[in-house]
Each structure stands twice: as structure tokens, then as C-alpha cells.
Image (spheres, helix red, strand yellow):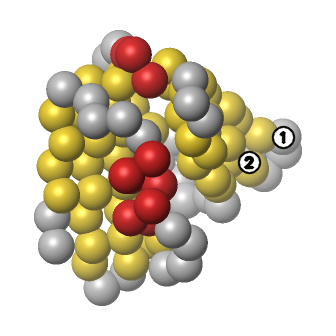
Amino acid sequence: MLDKDTLRNGVFIATDRQVFFFCKKMIGFETESFPLSNISSVEISKGLSGHKINIVASGNKAEMSMINRGQVKEFVEFVPAPKSVKVRQ
């Protein structure tokens, strides 16, 4: 059985009201919605394996790592500034 730390393909989707997280599982999928007003921190970093984004909202956390393509900078700029934003290069 795979645990929550197993790497899977997924996407973050940002709208004017929320950030939506969707990832595929071996059987089915997992989703989580973060209203923008509940986001307390966003952490962005980049390493050898690509970018990583962590979003924390009301005690829930979603992490996406190994992002090698896409619009990471634009995504972060689109999401309104929460209480805490950390960018690591």
C-alpha cells in the first residue's frame, strides 16, 4: 500500500477564489481545495530535481516537488500574497 509521501503526478490550479490540488493515485485520485483567505504560507524552492511548492492553509499542507516545467513564478504571482511567503533560490 502506498503512503501519503509516495510521489505521484499532480497539478496545482489557482483561481480568483482558491488553490486546487489534484493528484492521480494508483486507483483513483486525491483532491484538496484551499480558499485563498485560508492560505497561511506558501514556500517555493528550487533544487537539482526542479522547483518545489508547499502551501499551508488552516493546518492542511499540500506539497508538489520535482516541477521541471510549467509556470511556477507566474503561479506564485497569481496567488494573492498570504500571511507568509518564502522564496528560496
Q: Residue shown at 39%/78% (left/top)?
A: 50
Callout 1 touching callout 2 (CB < 8 Å): yes
Residue at 38 percent of width and 52 percent of height: 76
Q: Which residue is mark 1?
A: 28
Q: Residue furthest right?
A: 27
Q: Splitting the image into 4 quarters, where does residue 14 fall?
A: top right
For the residue pair 52 and 1, the one nearer the viewer reads as 52
Q: State the residue position of label 2.
A: 25
Marks 1/2: CA–CA distance: 5 Å
Q: Is residue 71 above or below residue 19?
A: below
Q: x, y percentage for residue 88? A: 15, 64
Judged left or right of residue 36, residue 13 is: right
The reply to whether residue 10 is in sight is yes
Total residue callouts? 2
Q: Position of residue 4 (x, y in %)?
A: 51, 41
Please name the amino acid that badge 2 sits on.
Lys
Residue 57 position (above or below residue 5): above
